[in-house]
Amino acid sequence: MKDQDWMKCALELAAKAASENEIPVGAIVVLNDEIIGEGYNSPISLCDPTAHAEIQAIRMACKKMNNYRLPGATLYVTLEPCSMCAGAMVHARIERVVYAATEPKSGVAESQGQFFQAPFLNHKVKVESGVLAETASIQLTQFFQYRRKQKKQLKEQAKNAI
């Protein structure tokens, strides 16, 4: 399969997150052309600030491989990783991360620095960006438009109740 095909799998997981009212981010870990881990954002539903898509996918992959290291694996994620997730990728020895949309506020692969190229790291993760970026961006934009609309409706209902 190609990067775009794998990213489509991650986008499906992102849609699942959105259906649970979580920010739509999905991730998969692929090794030897097989998905060994998958996850989607669920910090709200799990009451766990570390329950990002990448962390969920890495946890599942490590359990499947019975190893906390994932050499040779590629992680596909629909949004540029944050610092927590980037650090987890380094510790898990992910070989490559492929992401779709950039995250201007907290992405650390390119938007807020180039974490994976930091000289102090003992493992370098190869980075590829922009795979199905437009699709992922639209998914995120639609989610936040829907959320803003929900908040506005709730405010109006509260105002009318008074």
Image (cartoon, helix red, strand yellow):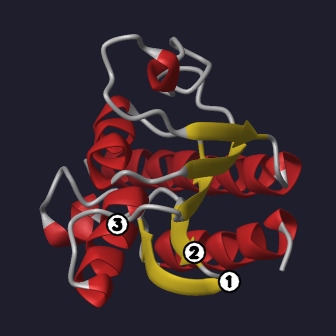
Please state if 52 lies on the left or on the right of 40 as rendered. left
How far is the residue under mark 1 from the one under mark 2? 6 Å
Q: Residue furthest left?
A: 47
Residue under circle 3? 58
Labels 1 and 2 touching (C-beta < 8 A): yes
* Residue 72, percent from left and from top: 52, 63
162 on left or right of 104: left
Residue 40: x, y in percent? 44, 70
User: Residue at image x 22%, y 74%?
Assistant: 67
Quarter of the image for residue 30 reads: bottom right
* Relative depth, front residue between 155 and 94: 94
Please report the residue visible at 62 percent of the width from the left and 56 percent of the height from the top: 143
Whole-percent x, y for residue 99 in the image: 66, 48
Residue closest to the eye, 153 or 135: 135
N-term-proximal mark, 1 vs 3: 1
Determine whether the residue tagged by mark 3 lies in a helix, strand or loop: helix
Determine which residue is flagged by label 2. Answer: 30
> Circle 1: is it few (<14), some (14-19), or many (20+) Cα within 10 Å?
few
Task: Please say if 9 is above or below 81.
Answer: below
Q: Which type of secondary structure does the marked residue at label 2 adopt?
A: strand
| Mark before the other along the chain sequence, 3 or 2 | 2
* Disc ID at residue 33: 1
